[in-house]
Image (cartoon, coloured by chain):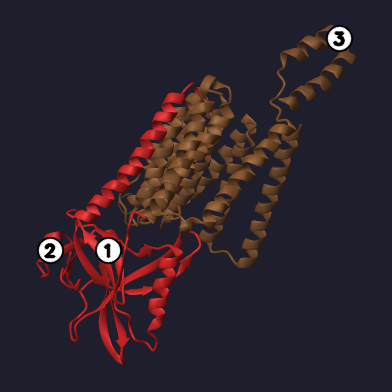
């Protein structure tokens, strides 16, 4: 915000000099733009000091961990968790320190995850890593909902995501992320949180992949195609529904996910007409993403299209069984196209 | 982003704390109530920087001479059962269900997996099974771990140290570690 105000100040001076804006309007216009949040040196030093104190405390406890009785260790862990949660409750009063509260709840979620593991270690409670991660994810989710904390929400999704792939990804037959991701998307929308929007969008893509992997033997290529189509529909819906930043984030990630799933669906043993149709559709979709990205001025969308285009060209080369020299030349050409597109996007962004 | 939710945050923190305490108490009660069995094992003592000192437990036992390996390897994650002799912790058989495992003999069924390998003992090749009952380490403080290491190293020359993992098998079939016996010395898990 401070950057915007400085730029506006420079523009206003130029517009006043050109006679486009009356000079007496300068002050009211600048007054209408709020100053950005500034962190002064004392606050920064305070944060650094608190962090160092925390590290010193952790190092001291770690050095004497073996000497501490089991119950005391357990009490220490619970005390730290309750202390951080209590601090979050304290700072949430009156909505005076939203960032601090959010951070504390995020840290509390992480501490609880560590507490589950350490409790198992202290009392030699054998457990399934997947169950432990999912339990920690649910706990972070509870903290997120209790305090409307996007940070704890991100932690919840990350832990549930790790839980999806921990231990027995191949042998397990349960999937949680596909249910948690929509909840995350909803919270991101309601709280207008960008970090949570990123995390929930990625969680949805990972969750879809996990579900498809579970039923891959039965569904085959269709699972990836349906998953990709679903993400494409969601991307379109997000683009239509709103131009809020969270909706844009949803749209961008869903396009990446849709192109990824579509690409992967073609890595199966396709033959004849199906193979040609897939590769042609891949090129068309990649081109469409590039065009849409340039139209909407969304560089991340354009980048998704460029990456999909390169992947499609590579797949076609592989299908054709071209020689290494030919392939190297074509890859170099593709790389050149990507670099030129990147510079063009960058130039446009600066303009 | 953050609402006025001090009470809700505090309630969530207390609820999560209570759940962790309940887990510890429940596990302790189940450990005390289960049927105790000492499983023969090979023990070694790696030091893990991340999880503190522990004794890794490998429950390997030789099968009687001439006794063949089980027909299939049973991974722990498959959720199968093992049949044991409660008196000496000897492996008797395996199955997909408690009943199927006990049908092969034994008087105690525990959830777990089994892997059979050929190994050399005193220049004689024999079959040996390694049981996986979900218990693979005994966390010890530094003094305990060093004492155990000393016991393990006291017997050189390839002579095996008699070592057992003492587990409690509950009604749910889960094995919960109670302690270890190394060279006749038993170390139990305590609250302290």
For residue A100, above or below residue A126:
above
Q: Tell me, for residue B39, which label it has, or none.
A: none
The answer to whether mark 1 and mark 2 are in CB contact below 8 A is: no
Tell me the element at label 3. helix
For residue A41, above or below residue A166:
above
**Mark 2 = which residue?**
B100
The subunit letter for the residue under badge 2 reads B
The answer to whether mark 1 and mark 3 are in CB contact below 8 A is: no
**Mark 1 = which residue?**
B133
Q: CA distance from mark 1 to mark 2?
A: 17 Å
Residue B187, quarter of picture? bottom left
The answer to whether mark 3 and mark 2 are in CB contact below 8 A is: no
Observer-side mark, 1 or 2, equals: 1
Is disc 2 surrounded by few (<14), some (14 to 19) or many (20+) residues within 10 Å? some
- Residue B170: image location, x then y, percent: 19, 56
The residue shown at (45%, 41%) is A79
The subunit letter for the residue under badge 3 reads A
For residue A342, above or below residue A321:
above
- Residue A222: image location, x then y, percent: 37, 46
The residue shown at (42%, 49%) is A72
**Mark 3 = which residue?**
A23
Q: CA distance from mark 3 to mark 2?
A: 92 Å
Q: CA distance from mark 1 to mark 3?
A: 81 Å
Judging depth in this view, the residue of B134 and B185 nearest the camera is B185
The subunit letter for the residue under badge 1 reads B
- The chain displayed brown equals A
In the figure, is residue B60 to the left or right of B99?
right
Q: Colour of chain B?
A: red
Judging depth in this view, the residue of B56 and A141 nearest the camera is B56
Number of numbered discs visible in the structure rendering? 3
Residue lying furthest bottom in this view?
B123
């Amino acid at each position: 915000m401070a950057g915007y105000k400085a730029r506006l100040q420079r523009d206003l001076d130029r517009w006043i000099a050109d006679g486009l804006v009356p000079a007496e309007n300068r002050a009211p216009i600048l007054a209408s733009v709020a100053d950005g949040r500034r962190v002064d040196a004392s606050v920064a030093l305070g944060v650094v000091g608190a962090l160092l104190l925390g590290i010193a405390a952790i190092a001291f406890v770690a050095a004497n961990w073996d000497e501490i009785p089991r119950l005391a260790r357990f009490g220490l862990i619970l005390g730290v968790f309750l202390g951080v949660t209590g601090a979050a409750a304290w700072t949430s009063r009156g909505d005076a320190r939203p960032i601090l509260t959010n951070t504390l709840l995020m840290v509390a979620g992480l501490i609880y995850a560590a507490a589950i593991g350490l409790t198992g270690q202290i009392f030699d409670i054998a457990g399934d890593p997947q169950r432990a991660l999912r339990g920690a994810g649910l706990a972070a989710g509870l903290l997120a909902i209790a305090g409307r904390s996007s940070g704890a929400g991100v932690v919840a999704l990350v832990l549930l995501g790790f839980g999806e792939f921990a231990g027995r990804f191949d042998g397990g037959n349960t999937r949680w992320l596909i249910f948690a991701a929509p909840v995350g998307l909803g919270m991101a929308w309601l709280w207008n949180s960008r970090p949570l929007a990123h995390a929930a969008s990625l969680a949805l893509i990972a969750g879809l992949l996990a579900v498809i992997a579970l039923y891959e033997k039965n569904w085959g290529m269709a699972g990836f195609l349906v998953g990709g189509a679903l993400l494409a529909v969601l991307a379109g819906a997000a683009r239509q529904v709103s131009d809020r930043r969270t909706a844009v984030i949803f749209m961008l990630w869903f396009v990446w996910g849709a192109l990824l799933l579509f690409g992967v669906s073609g890595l199966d043993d396709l033959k004849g007409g199906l193979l040609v149709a897939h590769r042609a559709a891949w090129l068309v979709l990649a081109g469409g993403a590039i065009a849409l990205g340039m139209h909407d001025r969304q560089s991340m969308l354009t980048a998704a299209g460029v990456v999909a285009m390169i992947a499609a060209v590579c797949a076609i080369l592989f299908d054709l069984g071209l020689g290494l020299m030919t392939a190297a030349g074509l890859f170099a050409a593709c790389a050149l196209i990507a670099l030129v597109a990147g510079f063009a996007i960058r130039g446009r962004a600066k303009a | 982003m953050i609402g006025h939710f001090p009470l809700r945050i505090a309630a969530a923190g207390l609820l999560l704390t209570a759940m962790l305490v309940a887990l510890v108490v429940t596990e302790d009660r189940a450990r005390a109530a289960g049927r105790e069995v000492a499983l023969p094992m090979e023990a070694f003592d790696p030091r893990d920087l991340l999880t503190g000192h522990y004794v890794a437990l490998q429950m390997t036992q030789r099968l009687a001479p001439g006794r063949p390996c089980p027909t299939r390897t049973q991974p722990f994650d498959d959720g199968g059962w093992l049949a044991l002799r409660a008196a000496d912790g000897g492996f008797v058989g395996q199955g997909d269900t408690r009943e199927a495992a006990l049908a092969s003999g034994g008087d105690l069924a525990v959830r777990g997996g089994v892997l059979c390998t050929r190994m050399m003992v005193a220049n004689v090749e024999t079959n040996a099974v390694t049981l996986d009952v979900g218990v693979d380490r005994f966390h010890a403080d530094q003094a305990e771990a060093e004492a155990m290491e000393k016991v393990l190293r006291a017997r050189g020359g390839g002579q095996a140290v008699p070592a057992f993992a003492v587990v409690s098998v509950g009604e749910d079939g889960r094995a919960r570690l109670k302690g270890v016996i190394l060279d006749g010395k038993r170390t139990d898990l305590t609250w302290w």
